[in-house]
Amino acid sequence: MKDLLEKLSNAHGVSGFEGSVRQIIEEEVRPYVDEIRTDKMGNLIATKRGGSPVLMLAAHMDEVGLMVKYIDDKGFIYFTKTGGWFDQTLLNQRMVLHAEHGIVYGVIGSKPPHAIKEEDKNKVIKAEDMFIDIGATSREDAEKLGVRTGTPMTPDMEFKSLGNDMVTGKAFDNRAGCTMLIEGLRRIKDVKATIHAVFTVQEEVGLKGARTSAFGLNPDVAVATDVTYTGDHPGIEKKQSSIEMGKGPSITVSDAQGRGIIVPQSVLKWLKEAAESDNIPYQLEVGEGGTTDASAIHLAREGIPSGVISPPSRYIHTPVSVLSMNDLENSARLIAKAVEIADRFF
């Protein structure tokens, strides 16, 4: 699992440009399913044929990133954010520009402290005031490198191991979910259900791929796999998030103060029983901010009962997310066990 997470974390696929990630996932998942196809939106749908019930397991492929908005006469690049960023985490990052002729590297520059006026030192720099330096001398020079308006960008950050079972990297939201879904499929043996493992596009910009794929598949029940933020590090209080690293996957009860999803009791009972029957540690989550593909899936057609399983992750939506491989392992165990007993509930 660690090797797979590393491969997926190091891959680049901002919302709307998930092709390279999709290619990796297709190769990894092929041995465990009967059929693979890509739909019109770009969602990868991997199906393991069976009987009833019909399950949809979703994990989004896209990551937050940036997009070129404007190149000035000196070749400096201004950008828009793709997905949710806290602006301060962007400053002085190195970026990968996925240009027409291949990869171009750039840095989000800033004034040196020597040149900042005293009254400006405590001001937050907004993303709209930041720029990217790719070493170009003019707009024409940047364009010769293949950089244009609309060129997508992702952080230049590689996966690394930390102490104990912790790892760090970019795009754990949601390459961790993709990893646990692939590993879950690998673990599933004799199952009566039909399984649609859907690796969705454009979650970070409106849950778009989940909405269209759920409409097309019309499953009996669905589970979204994603990461969730924790309340176990400095700067955040436990009352904001009771989720902790190392204590197992999170099972969502409600997110976004109920504006996202309020998980049906039947789905909660199913997921909790799956965990308890296999001695898998888990945590229950009531979230205030953020949501997942499940929020779009459960509103498709006449409504699809949906739940969420998430490995905890620190510092999500930054290039330096951290998670526990043991939590990820238990998340994969839980998704596999839930599938195995689904016919008893739906």
Image: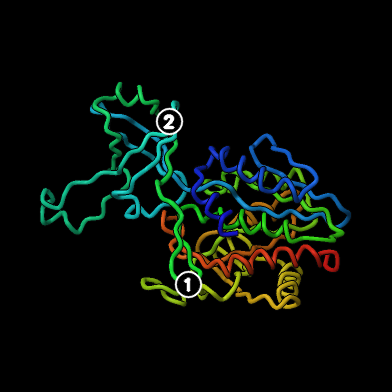
Residue found 58% across the figure and 47% down from its top: 61
Question: Could you say whether the residue bearing mark 1 is in a helix, strand or loop?
Answer: loop
In the rendering, at what x and y percent does residue 330 appear?
A: 64, 69
Q: What type is the residue that disc 2 sits on? A: Ala
Q: Is residue 288 visible?
A: no
Q: Nearer the viewer, residue 128 or 31?
A: 31
Task: Locate the C terminus by quadrant.
Answer: bottom right
In the rendering, at what x and y percent does residue 310 appear?
A: 60, 64
Q: Is residue 101 left or right of residue 275?
A: left
Q: Is residue 80 visible?
A: yes
In the rendering, at what x and y percent does residue 307 appear?
A: 68, 63
Q: Which mark is residue 164?
A: 1
Q: Is residue 27 left or right of residue 165?
A: right
Crowd band around label 1 with a 10 angstrom C-alpha radius: few (<14), some (14–19), many (20+): few
In the rendering, at what x and y percent does residue 67 appear?
A: 42, 37
Kindly indicate the quadrant of the structure image that contains residue 202: top right
Mark 2 vs 1, N-terminal side: 2
Q: Nearer the viewer, residue 276 or 11?
A: 11
Residue found 38% across the figure and 28% down from its top: 147
Q: Nearer the viewer, residue 106 or 165?
A: 165
Q: Which mark is residue 99?
A: 2
Q: What type is the residue that disc 1 sits on? A: Asn
Q: Is residue 120 left or right of residue 26?
A: left
